[in-house]
Image (cartoon, coloured by chain):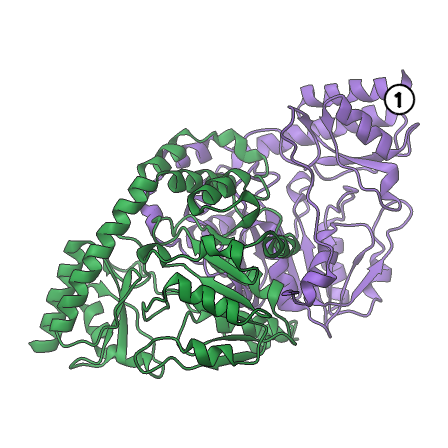
Chain colours: A green, B purple
Amino acid sequence: MEYFGRRVRGIVPYTAGEQPRDRRYVKLNTNENPYPPSPATLQVLRAFDGAALRYYPAPDADDLCAAIAEAEGVGRENVLCGNGSDEVLFLTFAAFFDESRGVCFPDITYSFYEVYAGFFGVPVAMVPLRADFTMDLAAMAKAECAGYYIANPNAPTGVGIPAERIAAFAASVPECIVIADEAYMDFYGQSCARLTSAHPNLLVVKTFSKSYSLAGIRCGYAIGNAALIGALRSMKDCMNSYPVDALCQAVCAAAVRDRAYHDETVARVVAERGRLRDALLALGFTVPESKANFLFAGRAAKSGKEIYTRLKEEGVLVRFWDKPVLRDFCRITVGTPEQNNKLLASLQHILFL
Amino acid sequence: MEYFGRRVRGIVPYTAGEQPRDRRYVKLNTNENPYPPSPATLQVLRAFDGAALRYYPAPDADDLCAAIAEAEGVGRENVLCGNGSDEVLFLTFAAFFDESRGVCFPDITYSFYEVYAGFFGVPVAMVPLRADFTMDLAAMAKAECAGYYIANPNAPTGVGIPAERIAAFAASVPECIVIADEAYMDFYGQSCARLTSAHPNLLVVKTFSKSYSLAGIRCGYAIGNAALIGALRSMKDCMNSYPVDALCQAVCAAAVRDRAYHDETVARVVAERGRLRDALLALGFTVPESKANFLFAGRAAKSGKEIYTRLKEEGVLVRFWDKPVLRDFCRITVGTPEQNNKLLASLQHILFL
């Protein structure tokens, strides 16, 4: 017997980066932050009233939303939290798109967008990146669709777009929703969060997984005007009343409020990003200028697959996709100086010995 | 401008029980456990390596699934974990139903099923409960549908069905999927989890929110044969690669492994359930025999709404729905002996003074 509906029969799910347990790797494959989360988050864990876990959490994560609103310079009613930015992105697909409201995004970008579109039966208009990996916003503006996903900085290229250009794009397509996926934005500093008040069709999505070093706790959020946030909340309440658990709310609120620690670790990653890119260029790689916490490096003396495979043998994990264009490259997370030195020594060895 | 798709325009979301902050209530409205979670969970919190939160969690919650498999007497490949059983139920709708594969459930049951059906555009065949609040499985077996949701014990009535009858029902509808929603099952002890190996169309869904006193941490799971679990995992990977965070995995695994504590707190709730029901019957309420951690009490000298409202004034929160049949009743969570005594004293006052 076959018990499955059309979604099970018709979709190829997203594949996350490998999390091998067989040995210790220098793990530069899933864009985790090389520094631990704020010490304030650890204090929250130690002090948390475990007995209170018998109660359901605040369904709309009020205190966490207040902390985010203050940090992002928006109102409390402009924030919605979810179980990772992946869940928040899923909610945006549910709210803004359907079989007759299509979506547009670049051909090379976060590959989960295409999975969500398949899940909801949403028609997709893909616009190729330019040869230099920048987004062709002019071509995207002409696409027939109800809205856009713009990963900024883009994945896996790392290429960024200034906030004012995103805002101008949103203004140029006033009948469409524009979702700026800013998962990596804190390594760039060009967030559109504050611009959402002036642009009723602009929604920003961010995460605690990267700049806050909290990939393990699963929290992301959306910022936009109250009508957009209200629609996302409706979708949340069609899926799961309490997507953000009580510990997660407390830990993330502490992380947001420790702005100094956040900014310091971000600055360290950004400094290493520049040094690592220069070294990769010197090794003969093509590396688009990255505004994220990773570098997209390829077109060197060996193929992306060979570099990925040989690095893994040497105990360094990076991300590789066996797909057109992407297969010439690897995506390399910026690590600590020591991790990056190990990577560079291995690459030297692989390419030239 | 209108940026929303058909789902936002067409669905009434689920409304969770109120979580007021204005004063301290004797909170008997959301079926939380009156006892704290296992002391082992608190130790996990205190000992957790906060620095490791910078890594993504195990995407399929391997260790937690292993702990659940052992406790439930099934294989590791027969378990899938999600962000609360609400998310797991959402995944079952995504996997097993669509516009041409309809669903059947009783007219009085967990009201989230109807919301999920609306979200996915799934046709619904509702079969009325019998006058004594038991499920009419014979009528349900004749419904035109691709599958069933059977909350066992049912909500908000508390009425239970022995495991063998659920298994017989599944065997009688071999072309349909049967989802046994066992959120409250540990207060009854008639789980179908071990019967799933003999019934390829039977899937069991359970939660950590009730018998494990962990509503705050958000974890639920499905048990079924590997093909059903594989389909649910595909749907998970279309929504969110990492729905269960690292802390949640560790805390819930510790809770599952402390079977003695679990069984002891369950026994305490079950004992109070009997005492409380007898007292409510003596006050003139109609109270179906409950196998859950709540009682469905009504048809007394005052209406459900009046009892709910007056109890709230007296500092006791219970759940009330202003809907046909339900409006004659309140759903009352079984609390500690002290909480139940306060409830009974308030009811005495409301009904007879």
* Residue A171 screen position, x and y as percent: 52, 67
| Closer to the camera in the image, B144 or B49 | B49
Q: In this view, does A192 lie to the left or right of A350?
A: right
Residue A164 sits in quarter:
bottom left
Residue B282 sits in quarter:
top right
Q: Which residue is drawn at 59% across and 35% down?
A: A55
The residue that label 1 is drawn on is B351
- Does A186 sit above or below residue A134? above
* Residue A344 screen position, x and y as percent: 13, 65
Q: In which quarter of the image is the C terminus of chain A?
A: bottom left
* Residue B135 screen position, x and y as percent: 83, 52
| Closer to the camera in the image, B110 or B24 | B24
Q: Which residue is drawn at 53% across and 35% down?
A: A53
Residue furthest left as drawn = A353
| Closer to the camera in the image, A130 or A316 | A130
- Residue A298 visible to the viewer: yes
Secondary structure of the residue carrying tag 1 is helix
Q: Which residue is drawn at 70% across and 46% down?
A: B15
